[in-house]
Image (cartoon, rainbow, N blue to C red):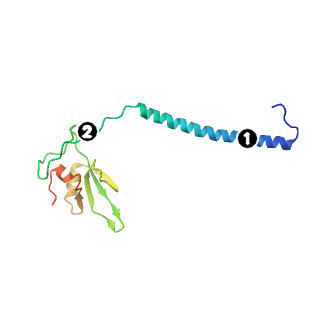
Amino acid sequence: MNDLPPDTRRLKVILAYLEKQIADEETLLTYLRLQVHNVQAALARAETPDPPAPQRRRGRPVKGGSNLPAMTQAGTSVGFVVQRKRTPNGPEPAMVHLDDCTLIEGMRYSISAHDARASLTDPNVVPCAFCRPDTELGIDVA
């Protein structure tokens, strides 16, 4: 670029153009760096082996069945969740679920089996009719 014009007006226009090109390229470089980071993260996720599928629980006993504590096949205790739902008319009664229940909505809090048993004695707390935590706990909620 030895053939630059001698007057300042045209030199300033050329300088402004070059600075704009540099700024545009920096924006593009920033975008490309972010994309490279996203692709690297996706590649790392794809290359890691999938975790083993969660073990399914054995069939739960029918109501009034065994009072044995709820256990998974691996022998660890089953988790429980208490759910609170707010509605325009105020909160609904709290509901206790098994931690893997697909019907859990709204605010959910993990609780122990002991807390689940204690909660189900409260008249303002109901067991989920789908996952039946009361049956899992071996208690009868009338």
Q: Name the residue type under label 1.
A: Glu
Residue found farthest to the right: 6
Residue 138 percent across, percent down from the top left: 15, 50
Residue 22 percent across, percent down from the top left: 70, 39
Q: Which mark is residue 130?
A: none
Q: Name the residue type under label 2.
A: Gln
Residue of label 1: 19
> Which secondary structure, mark 2?
loop
Report the quarter where the C terminus lies.
bottom left
Q: Would you place residue 73 above or below residue 102 in this image?
A: above
Residue 124 percent across, percent down from the top left: 24, 63
> Which secondary structure, mark 1?
helix
Residue of label 2: 55
In this rendering, position of residue 109 left or right of residue 47? left
- Taking depth in this image into account, of 2 and 123 the one nearest to the observer is 2
Residue 41 percent across, percent down from the top left: 47, 35
Q: Would you place residue 107 above or below residue 26 in this image?
A: below
Q: Would you place residue 77 above or below residue 93 in this image?
A: above
At a point 31% along the width and 53% down the height, the residue shown is 104
Report the quarter where the N terminus lies.
top right
At a point 65% along the width and 39% down the height, the residue shown is 26
User: Which quadrant of the structure image shows residue 13?
Assistant: top right
Residue found farthest to the bottom: 89
- Crowd class of label 2 (few under 14; some 14 to 19; many from 20; radius 10 Å): few
Residue found farthest to the left: 65
Q: How much space separates mark 1 and mark 2, taking CA atoms? A: 60 Å
In this rendering, position of residue 91 left or right of residue 68? right
